[in-house]
């Protein structure tokens, strides 16, 4: 699905992502794990072309020339949802479909389908983001990301702004949704618990541990815990476990 | 977004409608006058004399100072106006150093202009003091002033600036040690009578000299030249019109003019009535002035047209400019500085600068208001757009929205409350500034303010000032309402403390 060939990102001369080679296969669930500032969000953003990068990135085998075309095949969810405050939940979800000229009936049918998937009711969809709880906002953000039935879901710390109860509930639901839809998923988290949870299914999932803009180790999450590549990996995993 | 477009269209339509309202009638001979009473009376006299000769004529009263009238005559916006030989020789054509009035005739002819023979009086400059001050300090001649450097002197703004004004006088009499400041000529007498200043310049036909019991200092070195009143007109004026103006030569002496000035300034007689009196006509057939409410209504339409057209134009330019400034940070900085710089040009100066390009009247006023309206709108559009959280911009980009769609569906709606606040500021400023347009003949609420100051008539001043304040308030309330209407419901809730 994605092939990165020495992809690198600099902000004002500072290397946010060192030249990185990486391949993400179709249907794979990849968890980008690491402390804050490790470059995991930068890597995710560069997968959606949201940050200018050097090197090459291929999507479905072809170098990206027009990001806009690619983005309609990506669903992107960020920490606090990134919902537009001036639009209702429904307005947020249907925005891009309207822009593409979908018919009202098709939009309504798709929204019903997605609302059932994320367990939101019609009344909640008519509210503005400010009137929704954090968990509801993330469900709306997920609906918005899934509206055009993308091939890939990119999620940047989707659970970190939520209270523990909501977080656990939504994490379970997300995993169920990922399993049901069979999409390629790249999810960023700083929490080993979340990484374990989403990268549970050994075959199709992988954890990538990052530090200082570099990939330190990748593989099945169990392998990382059992055979840390260096003291940093061991320390990071132990620290996460200690709390 | 559709709502904004609709609002813009309505505003533009309103502006066009109002702009067409005072539609120009068939070309009549246009008489102009300066913004002091004598000039207005002389303008009326010319208008009536022309009409009596069967020539259609109208009078654009109170068009500011000499330079504005001169420029308007040169560009053909007016056909005739009263001026003084001294003003023409020493101010308007001072570069030519004309030795006498014959040379003045030639210089005018070379510019396609002509002047009548003198009307019979000189309204020259003089210096005036209160009688008690003059007696106490034993001042009778201008040369006596040199011994009194402590005098508080305030002279008309025009007199400070002109070539034959205070600087030349000070040199001729050796008054370099005296401090002098500028004051509006009409306010000077009141300040003098109230003892706030000791000395001011006066015109020899001013009614106040006798009314306030002032002493005119003897010009013992004959510094002041004669200021014979004449009509200056375009050479292309029809012969009948020229004859009608010439027939007025020698018909008004200084005492007569001072009397006419006194009746208008002190006794509340209208300029038209005074002009008819000067022409030996009774006032039985004088046109009744329109009633107060009709006057205010007419002024309201004029004022609204000035503000609405300027504002509609500013919207069409400033919002795209603000968007551009927000998109290109570097060029944006230059755009912001440029509009900010415009704001620092003194408004009166800007009005006058625009006259050679746009003539007098509504056009230069609208242009000036337009320029002043740019900054608040550009600045707020820029601030509204750059203030949007980068996360939301990322979200919009990640969805795959094009830049145009992002602007239309996300950025402008989110910036709208800020943009509206800028438009409101621009509107309120424009309503206030538009009153200055009266000086260059734009009409509006400034007209009664100007007339009221000239006649020292508070009632007339309020006739302009109160509606102007009311209109500013009305604009403020209207835009508050619009702002509330166009603010998306989600943003209002966000303001009330929820997240985002």
Image (cartoon, rainbow, N blue to C red):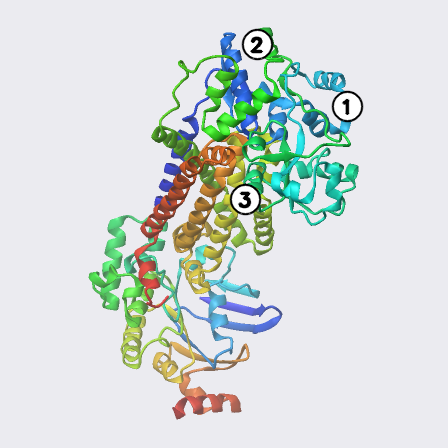
Residue on which the image places disc 2: B244
Q: Residue at x 51, y 59 (%)?
A: A64
Q: Is residue B84 visible?
A: yes
- Give the quadrant of residue A165: bottom left
Pointers 1 and 3 in contact (C-beta within 8 Å): no
10 Å crowding of disc 3: few (<14), some (14-19), many (20+): few
Mark earlier in primary sequence (1, 3): 1
Q: Secondary structure at mark 2?
A: helix
Residue B287 picture location, percent across and down: 40, 18
10 Å crowding of disc 1: few (<14), some (14-19), many (20+): some
Residue A183 picture location, percent across and down: 35, 68
Mark earlier in primary sequence (3, 2): 3
Residue on which the image places disc 1: B98
Residue on which the image places disc 3: B194
- Give the quadrant of residue A187: bottom left
Residue B319 picture location, percent across and down: 48, 46
Q: Secondary structure at mark 1?
A: loop
């Amino acid at each position: 699905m994605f092939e990165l060939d020495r992809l690198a990102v600099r902000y004002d001369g500072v290397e946010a992502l060192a030249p990185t080679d990486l391949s993400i296969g179709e249907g794979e669930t990849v968890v980008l794990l690491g402390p804050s500032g490790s470059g995991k969000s930068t890597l995710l953003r560069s997968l959606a072309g949201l940050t200018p990068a050097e090197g090459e990135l291929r999507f479905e085998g072809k170098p990206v020339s027009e990001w806009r075309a690619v983005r309609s095949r990506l669903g992107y969810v960020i920490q606090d949802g990134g919902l537009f405050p001036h639009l209702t939940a429904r307005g947020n979800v249907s925005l891009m479909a309207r822009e593409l000229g979908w018919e009202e009936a098709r939009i309504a049918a798709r929204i019903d389908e997605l609302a059932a998937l994320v367990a939101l009711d019609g009344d909640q969809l008519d509210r503005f983001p400010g009137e929704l709880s954090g968990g509801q906002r993330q469900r709306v953000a997920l609906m918005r990301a899934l509206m055009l039935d993308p091939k890939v879901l990119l999620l940047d710390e989707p659970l970190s702004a939520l209270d523990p109860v909501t977080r656990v509930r939504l994490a379970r639901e997300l995993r169920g949704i990922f399993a049901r839809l069979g999409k390629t998923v790249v999810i960023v988290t700083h929490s080993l618990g979340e990484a374990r949870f989403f990268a549970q299914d050994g075959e199709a999932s992988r954890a990538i541990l990052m530090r200082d803009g570099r990939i330190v180790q990748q593989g099945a999450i169990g392998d990382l815990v059992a055979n840390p590549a260096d003291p940093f990996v061991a320390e990071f995993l132990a620290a996460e476990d200690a709390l | 977004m559709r709502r904004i477009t609709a609002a813009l269209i309505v505003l533009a339509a309103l502006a066009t409608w109002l702009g067409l309202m005072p539609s120009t009638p068939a070309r009549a001979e246009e008489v102009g006058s300066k913004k002091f009473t004598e000039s207005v009376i002389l303008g009326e006299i010319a208008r009536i004399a022309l009409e009596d000769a069967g020539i259609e004529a109208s009078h654009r009263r109170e068009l500011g100072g000499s330079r504005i009238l001169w420029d308007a005559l040169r560009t053909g916006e007016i056909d005739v106006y009263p001026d003084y030989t001294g003003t023409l020789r020493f101010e308007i054509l001072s570069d030519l150093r004309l030795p006498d009035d014959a040379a003045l005739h030639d210089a005018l002819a070379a510019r396609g202009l002509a002047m009548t023979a003198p009307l019979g009086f000189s309204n020259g400059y003089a210096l005036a003091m209160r009688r008690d001050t003059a007696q106490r300090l034993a001042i009778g001649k201008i040369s006596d002033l040199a011994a009194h450097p402590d005098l508080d002197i305030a002279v008309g703004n025009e007199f400070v600036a002109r070539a034959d004004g205070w600087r030349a006088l000070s040199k001729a009499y050796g008054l370099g040690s005296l401090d002098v400041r500028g004051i509006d000529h009409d306010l000077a007498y009141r300040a003098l009578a109230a003892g706030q200043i000791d000395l001011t310049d006066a015109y020899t036909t001013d009614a106040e000299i006798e009314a306030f019991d002032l002493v005119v200092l003897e010009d013992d070195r004959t510094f002041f030249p004669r200021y014979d009143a004449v009509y200056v007109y375009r050479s292309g004026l029809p012969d009948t019109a020229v004859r009608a103006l010439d027939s007025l030569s020698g018909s008004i002496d200084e005492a007569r003019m001072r009397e006419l000035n006194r009746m208008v300034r002190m006794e509340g007689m209208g300029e038209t009535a005074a002009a008819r009196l000067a022409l030996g006509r009774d006032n039985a057939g004088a046109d009744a002035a329109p009633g107060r409410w009709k006057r205010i209504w007419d002024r309201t339409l004029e004022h609204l047209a000035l503000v609405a057209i300027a504002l509609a134009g500013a919207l069409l330019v400033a919002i795209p400019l603000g968007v551009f400034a927000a998109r290109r940070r570097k060029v944006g900085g230059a755009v912001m500085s440029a509009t900010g710089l415009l704001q620092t040009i003194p408004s009166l100066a800007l009005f006058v600068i625009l006259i050679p390009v746009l003539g007098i009247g509504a056009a230069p006023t609208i242009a000036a208001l337009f320029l002043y309206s740019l900054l608040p709108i550009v600045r707020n559009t820029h601030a509204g757009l750059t203030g949007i959280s980068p996360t939301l911009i990322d979200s919009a980009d990640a969805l795959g929205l094009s830049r145009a769609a992002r602007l239309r569906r996300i950025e402008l709606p989110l910036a709208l409350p800020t943009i509206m606040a800028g438009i409101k500021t621009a509107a309120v400023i424009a309503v206030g500034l538009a009153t200055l347009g009266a000086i260059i003949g734009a009409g509006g609420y400034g007209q009664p303010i100007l007339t009221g100051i000239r006649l020292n008539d508070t009632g007339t001043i309020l006739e302009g000032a109160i509606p102007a304040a009311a209109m500013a308030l009305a604009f403020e309330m209207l835009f508050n309402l619009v702002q509330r209407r166009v603010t998306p419901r989600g943003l209002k809730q966000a303001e009330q403390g929820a997240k985002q």
